[in-house]
Amino acid sequence: MHRREFLRICGRSAGAMAFGPGVVLQSCESQPTLPEPDERLTLRIPRTMDAGDALLAAGAAELDLGSYTSRGWGYNGTLPGPTLRTRVGDRARIRVLNQLSEETTIHWHGMVVPASMDGHPADAVLSGAGYNYEYPIAQRAGMNWYHPHPHGRTGRQIWRGLAGAFIVEDPAAEQGLPSGDREIPLLLRDGLLDGSGPFEYRRRDSGMVGDFPLVNGVPYPRITLAPALHRFRVLNAANARVFRLGMSNGSRFTLIGNDGGLLDQPVDLDRIDLGPAERVDILLDLSDQVVGAGLSLRCSRAGWDLLEIHVVGEPNGETVIPTAFSAIQLLPVGPGTRRRHFRFEGHRRINGREYRMDEVGFRVPLGETEIWEFESAGGAPHPVHVHGAHFQVLSRSGGRGRVFPWEQGWKDTVLLEDRERVEIAVRFDSYTGIYLLHCHQLEHEDAGMMLNFEVT
Ligand code: C2O
Ligand code: CU
């Protein structure tokens, strides 16, 4: 795709055509951004695949951006890759083929799986080879995701287009929530307006940040919905961008879940800050929207209307938002709980060290609760991610100074801004073996802000 073609489709024609090479586009919070188009493209819903019998081929692809294609990489040729679905108690069986010309692995982000199935960089799948990932689904329902995790190349491979959602269902726990076409997965990321295409990777230590939004692979899409309650399952799949989500008209919505599944109670909110790799599960009640009225899911940090929502049709049935979900047990912590401290420094170090694939940083006993303290020392935001278990956020001091409603319950990634200290409680209950702790700002991760630990 050519820059001019992209501008024609995506830009407000008059304004966009006036941009020459190197001209700074509409500026918002000092980042150049591509203006939204007059005519929006329709949101794509990725096709669903049963994780019990799935085949994912990672390879070069002409990625479909709605009305044109651009060269990138995809799982089964698409961005996002197919949405995998499974149920608590089932078994995932996923064959992965590496049709790239370099090594890759797949990490099932948020899935608690045996170490050999976790997509650790040491378990690289060579070009032309395959790997059979198989594991039981023994965790709470929620939206997770899958993406590459090869040594030093994760940022590039995800940016090129390799990522998809992985939904674990539990019909009993999710009773009464919107489903079918009222349950909409939204994979958010950004792309770069660049002569060589939006998926051209330009590594920057400070993070690969694009200048226009892609929602399920479509720039600035729209969706037409009935005046009813909808469930949006939102994933920040960007390399380095933090989204500040809200509705364009300031209306409130209901947060029901996050990384590790449903909260114990819904929370009414008007904004959420979502760091890379974090997820939120939200209910949006469109039943009293004026039919024909437009509103958008907005990122107020970037000034982007990410998804325009058009309400069309007759309201049918009343809207019932559940008042509670199953209770969340707090991990037992006390004065005797073992503590560890991790300092995320600049762009590449944890506690003064860069990642070494063959080095185990520390050992954690299976089944014991620990308190881990993450400290941000320059280079933030650092979205800190733990493999092998979910955790609970206990506190945040410095910086924003509080734990936000979207950080309750079970998490696997927590955002650290500048000068923040965050304490989590974590317990590895499922498997022994080597797992990763790392920054999910992918350029930090690739530069070495990652650590192996062993559950023993
Ligand atoms: Cu989403 Cu270690 O990664
Ligand atoms: Cu970082």
Image (cartoon, rainbow, N blue to C red):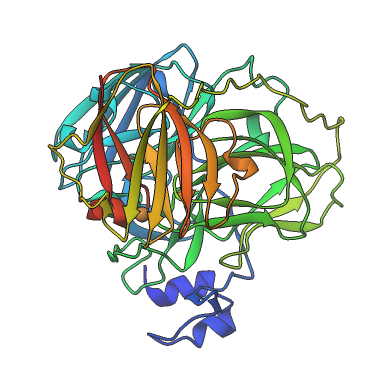
- Tell me if I can see residue 149 in this picture: yes
Q: Quadrant of ligand 1?
A: top left
Q: Nearer the viewer, residue 164 or 241?
A: 241
* Number of on-image labels: 0
Q: Is residue 289 above or below residue 322?
A: below
Q: Is residue 79 above or below residue 219?
A: above
Q: Is residue 95 above or below residue 341?
A: above
Residue 49 picture location, percent across and down? 44, 28
User: Going 84% across and 41% down the picture, which residue do you hit?
Assistant: 287
Residue 52 picture location, percent across and down? 39, 18
Would residue 262 be found to the left or right of residue 195 on screen?
right
Would residue 9 be found to the left or right of residue 239 on screen?
right
Residue 48 picture location, percent across and down? 48, 31
Would residue 437 be found to the left or right of residue 64 on screen?
left
Q: Nearer the viewer, residue 78 or 413?
A: 413
User: Going 72% across and 60% down the picture, which residue do you hit?
Assistant: 248
Q: Nearer the viewer, residue 217 or 450?
A: 450
User: Going 79% across and 44% down the picture, which residue do you hit?
Assistant: 286
Residue 66 picture location, percent across and down? 50, 56
Q: Quadrant of the C terminus?
A: top left
Q: Quadrant of the N terminus?
A: bottom left
Examine the image and state in which quarter residue 179 appears. Answer: top right
- Tell me if I can see residue 160 in this picture: no
Q: Is residue 362 above or below residue 414?
A: above
User: Going 60% across and 48% down the picture, which residue do you hit?
Assistant: 402
The residue most toward the top is 89
The residue most toward the front is 335
